[in-house]
Image: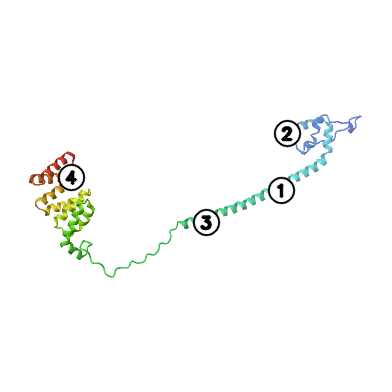
Amino acid sequence: MGWRCSPPREEAGMSANDVKCTDPRLGRLLAQYELGLLPEREREAFANHLLHCDFCHAELYALEPIMDRLRAKREAALASRRRAVLVKLLLALRANRGRALRWTASILVAVSAGVTAFFWLRAPEKPPETPPLALPEKAPSPSSGSSLSADRIARLRSAETTDALERARSAYEKGDFVRAVELLLPIAQLDPENAEAHFWLGASWLKLNRPQDAIAPLRRAAQLSVGVERERSRYYLALAYARAGHREEALRELEALIAENGVYRPEAEQAKRQLLRSGTVR
């Protein structure tokens, strides 16, 4: 460390013990200087001090063998310390690497198990096997358009038709229009020539505020009826047309009734005025 020279010669009349450090403040830095521990600024200051201080120069020269051994030990200690730090670092890296690998493996296993469970739970269950349908031994014969038995049809076409029609009219007069429709529908279907059944069926549909359903039976009743019953059927048919929104058809029926000058002429004239004024008849 630093420069080296031979020890200073003793001047005449002076012994080595008489030599003193010219700047004790800097002289105390000798050992640190020799070991290379001084900062750059203090190192330069001590080097300049050595140029003028024979005492420090002699001390530095005398300490050289000891300092060489100290430097060697210091370098060995530093090297050993660096190796120890390096070994610890490598061991830590290896341990962390193993831990990281274990954590990574654990995470991969957990994710794999989670994905497997997710798709397993979402997988639809096997649908139950549907047993084959048993075919009937004998196919039923097609009906004639009615669910009623042949015996029921025969009785309705006979005297019972009159009784059912009377009960339907009674239900109508009592305001039970739903019951009237229930009784009149099979009569109108099984006895399509029964004008009374068609008329009361159409009138019941009108009372239930279903004018579109009332048009067909009232039209049929008007075709089958004569006299006052025909006028009555055409008047109710005009009401059904008007309430269903068929204004032209309603006017045609009302004007025909007015032209016939029959029993229903006053009602037809009043209905026509109401239809022309408001677009419907109540």
> Rounded to the nearest whole Å, what is the CA distance between mark 3 and mark 2?
63 Å
> Rounded to the nearest whole Å, what is the CA distance between mark 2 and mark 1?
29 Å
Q: Residue at x 14, y 40 (%)?
A: 273
Residue 242: x and y, percent?
18, 45
Q: Residue 221 carries which label?
A: none
Q: Which residue is drawn at 82% across and 34% down?
A: 57
Q: Is the C-beta separation of discs 4 and 3 under 8 Å?
A: no
Q: Is the C-beta separation of discs 3 and 2 under 8 Å?
A: no
Q: For mark 3, what is the residue?
A: 113
Q: For mark 1, what is the residue?
A: 84
Residue in front for this viewpoint, 232 or 78: 232
Q: For mark 2, what is the residue?
A: 40
Question: Could you say whether the residue bearing mark 3 is in a helix, strand or loop?
Answer: helix
Q: Which mark is residue 242?
A: 4
> Rounded to the nearest whole Å, what is the CA distance between mark 4 and mark 1?
110 Å
Q: Could you tell me which quadrant the N terminus lies in?
A: top right
Residue in front for this viewpoint, 49 or 137: 137
Question: Considering only vertical position in the picture, is 209 above or below 61?
Answer: below
The answer to whether residue 117 is seen in the rendering is: yes
Residue in front for this viewpoint, 113 or 34: 113
Residue 169 lies left or right of residue 19; in this view the side is left
Residue 21 lies left or right of residue 185; in this view the side is right
Q: In which quarter of the image is residue 224?
A: bottom left
Indicate which label's residue lies in the foreground, 3 or 1. Answer: 3
Residue 232: x and y, percent?
13, 49
Q: Earlier in the sequence, mark 2 or mark 1?
A: 2
Mark 3 belongs to which amino acid?
Ala
